[in-house]
Image (cartoon, helix red, strand yellow):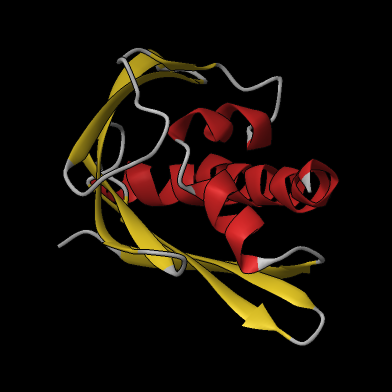
Amino acid sequence: MPKVYQFSREQIIKTDIDSAWDFIRSPANLNKITPPDMTFTILSEIPEVMYNGLIIQYKIGIPFIGEQNWVSELKHIREKHSFVDDQRIGPYKLWYHYHEITEQADGIRFYDHVTYSIPFGIFGELAHVLYVQPQLNKIFNFRAEVTPTLF
């Protein structure tokens, strides 16, 4: 049985719930919060606003492996509150990314929780320590830096 990992991140951004929701419900905005040195391309046609069951195809670059397709389904959308990005095809054995926004006294709390598993047994565990975990930190550190500038 492969190991299942958890990753969470949150930050408060000075904005309002409508602006925050307008931003996160647009699939195209994912490019704005992805580090520029990461190979990431949206391949499918995407609507301006996500909806339950939306399938999005990406191509991502993975060191030592090369480019790989990633297919996600957006689901469990709760207007102005949360949604899930569930990998259907991709580099992970499991990728379930919960996104949530909530109003706070000092702004909007953006919360991400990812449950994921990596294939390849012990090699996947080694890849997690050497690459996946540091890469997730890098991605979410970048998001923490750039997202407030977008509001």
Task: Give the image location of residue 60, x and y in percent.
Answer: 44, 20
Q: Nearer the viewer, residue 13 or 139?
A: 13
Q: Residue 11: in sight, yes or no?
A: yes
Q: Residue at x 66, y 37 (%)?
A: 33
Q: Is residue 138 left or right of residue 119?
A: right
Q: Residue 89: in sight, yes or no?
A: no
Q: Nearer the viewer, residue 117 or 84?
A: 84
User: Looking at the image, is 15 positioned above or below residue 70?
Assistant: below
Q: Quadrant of the N terminus?
A: bottom left
Task: Give the image location of residue 9, x and y in percent.
Answer: 61, 67
Q: Nearer the viewer, residue 60 or 57?
A: 57
Task: Give the image location of residue 75, x and y in percent.
Answer: 23, 54
Q: Residue at x 36, y 21 (%)?
A: 58
Give the image quarter of residue 14. bottom right
Q: Nearer the viewer, residue 68 or 9?
A: 9
User: Looking at the image, is 47 positioned above or below residue 131?
Assistant: above
Q: Is residue 8 left or right of residue 65?
A: right
Give the image quarter of residue 150. top right
Q: Residue at x 29, y 42 (%)?
A: 92
Q: Residue furthest front?
A: 18
User: Looking at the image, is 109 positioned above or below residue 18?
Assistant: below
Give the image quarter of residue 70. top left
Task: Give the image location of residue 62, x and y in percent.
Answer: 47, 22
Q: Is residue 79 left or right of residue 74?
A: right
Marks counted in the figure total 0
Q: Residue at x 70, y 44 (%)?
A: 138
